[in-house]
Amino acid sequence: MLLVNLYYVFIVICVGQNLVTGSSTTNSPTECTLIAKDPDIQKDLRLILDQGTNMIAIHLITPNRTVWKLSDGDIFDPFTWMRIRSKKGRGMLWLREEFEVLSLTTLTYGVSNLKVEVVESTPGCIANQMMLSTLAEAFVFSDFQLNRSAESSWTAEEELCNRRLRGTPSGARVYYVCCHKDEKGDVLCSEMTRDFWVTVLLTCVVLLNFFVIMYLPLVIPSHLYRASRGYVAYEHKLATELKLRIMKTRHPPKPDLSTDLSNIIHRSALKESPNLRELVDNLTEDKTYELPIRTMHFLVSRGRLISENYVPVGIAKTLYNTILRCKISKRTSLTKCCRSRIFGHVVNQRWNFTWYKCLQKCMDVVILIMIICPWILRVVVYMLFEKKNHLLYQKAAISRGLSLGFRGSFTLMLNPLHVVFIVCYALIFVDILLIGLLQKTVTDNFVFVLKKCFRDMRDRSPKRVIGWGTMVLLKPCEKCGILALILAPIYWILILPLVLFILLVSLFPTINLTVRCLIYVFINFLPSKKSGSDKTPSAFVKRFTEFFEIDFLISKETFEIPGNQTLSRRSAQITILLVCLITMYSTIFLITECITFFVEVAVYTVIGIILNSAHTMQYVSLVFMLFLYGKDCFGSVSGKYLVFNKTIISTVMAKADDQVKQVSWLSEDLQANTAFQLKSETPVAPGSVSIPMSDSELASINRPVIVVKENVLRWKIKRLVLFLDKRDTPYITERFFFDTSKMPCCGSPGPLLNNLCGAISGYLVIIGFLLFVLLVVITFGDMYDVNSSNQTLAALAGGFLPWVFRNVLFKRAADPTVDTSNLHFQGCFGNVIERYVQTWPFDDIEGMSESKQTSKTTIGTNLEMREVENKPLLETGRKGEILLSASHSDRPVSPTTEETIENWKSRVREVEDISILGHDLIIDVSKQKKDNLNV
């Protein structure tokens, strides 16, 4: 080090050059200049220049970096200089400083970084940043040399750019000043102005972020808040009348712990079945009664039914169900282990969970981590790459007394640990705790209002609002004729703000959702409706409504003023709605920041692919072919199951043809959602893949029975296969579909796992082949200097070979189709039908006489529309319970009148005492609810 320092002193004294004035005389010992510590830095620069780079980022490194004043002039960063060698490099200056990581390194091609360690010729001679900037500019223009007469590597097209900072009305703004040498060697500088297309691109990015914010609620899957997400009411007419033996008691027997089914349920679990609960309340304790049932009413989850044009065999859905939803536990090799308890028989059974339950909880945590993982990734990118530039920008702005401007993202303007973000985290966390800790009535209110707002937002009709706006704006022409040419401008000035506001509410979901929540808050401040207090609207209101077509605008809206309610009730509803609104905006704020970041990443990546297509097209073509081959491999599996599904549904329809025709010929108003039980046609088929059942097991499932499973009342019935909705769309259950797909007959696709494993193995082979092709192309392309276009063509040609092998040279025979007339198929199919048993959530019993069943059926079929359009806000039933809760929104609720009670009593008869095991249903009416009845 001593020899190096002596070398620098010798250079300063003997071979100086005045870089500021441009004179060729020897520098005086007191002159201040920058000197590169590495004497071979010019060779590194020449090597980078020979590579044909578009931009060189030169970073000056000095131990005295923090000594000089930061508020001196408009210099933002005198240590970083950009040497621009093409228009492509100049355009990249308008991108953010973190363009390398944001573009997933696609913008790193043609960009080089050069770090230069510098020292002052005289220690401490640089007084401020302005002087440092002047010396650094001369130092870079001289190619890091002291001798100005040496040959320069600069051309007339090259520019040297540096960032500056100035105040604007919107805050501190960073801009670039670029300098270049003219033919005489003089340095000319000017502020860099945006190219037209760069301005268009940046404007499009801003607009894209705006539309992301406005349409963000549409990202939430509609099945999370649709009324059809709950259970749909179905009915099944029994061939013979079923008599249920029921009894209520305060001392029920202990349930059988060896099975997860029971016939004992607590009265509190019947709140979703008001007719049955009313009946139980009118029965005498410890007596057995028979209840005749002619029609089963049960609930069906939409997720358990599949139509003929859909099969749940996608690779994403299968992986989700198998791993995250723990359905892998149904594999024969894992069933016993998953059902066993963690601590065996050592710990009390109440706290001793099964492996399956623990795995489910772990998967819930994994899903939660996956949901917040994008935001975690956003924070990591900020901490590792963006924080340094943000702190430099913040420090420079504050030192000059400037305000921090908005830089396209609140994460950049603030930071992920700012008080605004912490408040958002806290609000979401508190709301999660409240939902988990508050009473179910309060949480049901919260969920119901939120789902209703989302449903109405999703079902908005922009075309209807646009039509209304057009009618309103053309009113002068309609009412005044030719005088509209004079009156219309004044009318439009007055009415246009209202029309534009309503259009914004209709077109942008975020605004629509906000307005709906605020309307719900407002209507809770209105006075309660009282019977007989409705007043006829005034003449002015009628004329106003008719003139502006208000009825046409609000005819599809479902807002209703709640009835008589206490002040505490109204306050609770308003609080819930405000919490809902605040939480929604906190979540939207965080999701918007996250989505904005990923949109920016996508835009920068596309820019990098386009600007550096010579280097990226090989990889883009590889990704494109991987996508096509993946779609082909897994699409063939879906296609095979889809063809099989259509065959199965048509076969089931043919077997129940007579029953289906009797229902489908009814009009939609009279037709209900109906389930059909197929007739028993075959005994146990020899060689069946199903596990044989004993005679007692078969006898126990020949008739529908009521069981309690997971503290829910359910119907257990066999051969209930075909489901027909009121629009005559046929469905079969997902379980029945997969059972039939495993039949050992020609044309059956077989187990889904086997097919997916075959598709995955074939896809992995293709991936390996494509990677090998890419490796060969890159290796020989670099070895023999093959241009990028030829390398791309070679990669495409090599990637096309797997398709040729699969579809031309080694084309497989077409998959065999199912012959439904084949006796073997009929035997296997009949055996699957005979073995098919499933439980369905109990809906309710009919509380009306046989003559009134038709009208009840009609009400049930139209229930979904009534729930969406006519349900009062936060309607409550007996003892404050919410009617038609979100989980059972499609289930009809029958009135409980005195006539209905008498009808029940006339249909239920008392029978002699029988064995406790002979009861179909035992209702526990003890005061303390027993949560472990069916453990």
Image: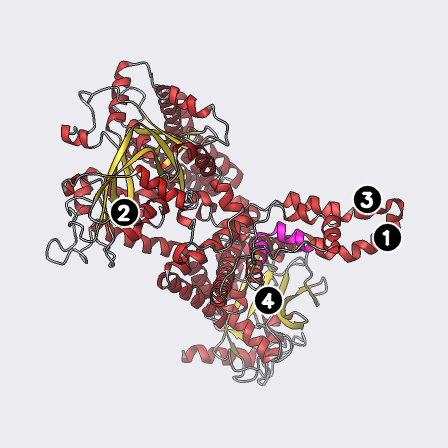
Please provide the residue range marked out in magenta: 501-515
Position of 281 relative to 173 (above/below): above
In-front residue for pair 293/208 = 293
Q: Where is residue 537 in the image (x, y as percent from the top left)?
A: 69, 54
Few, some or many residues within 10 Å of mark 4 (<14, 14–19, 20+): some
Mark linked to residue 226:
none
Q: Give the CA separation, mark 3 to mark 2.
A: 68 Å
Q: Earlier in the sequence, mark 4 or mark 1?
A: 4
Q: Earlier in the sequence, mark 3 or mark 4?
A: 4
Q: Mark 1 points at which residue?
A: 487
Amino acid type, label 4 = Phe
Mark linked to residue 478:
3
Proximity of marks 3 and 4: CB atoms separated by less than 8 Å = no
Q: Name the residue under label 4.
A: 406
Few, some or many residues within 10 Å of mark 2 (<14, 14–19, 20+): some
Q: Where is residue 326 in the image (x, y as percent from the top left)?
A: 28, 46
Position of 102 relative to 310 (above/below): below
Q: Main secondary structure of the magenta part?
A: helix
Q: Name the residue under label 2.
A: 283
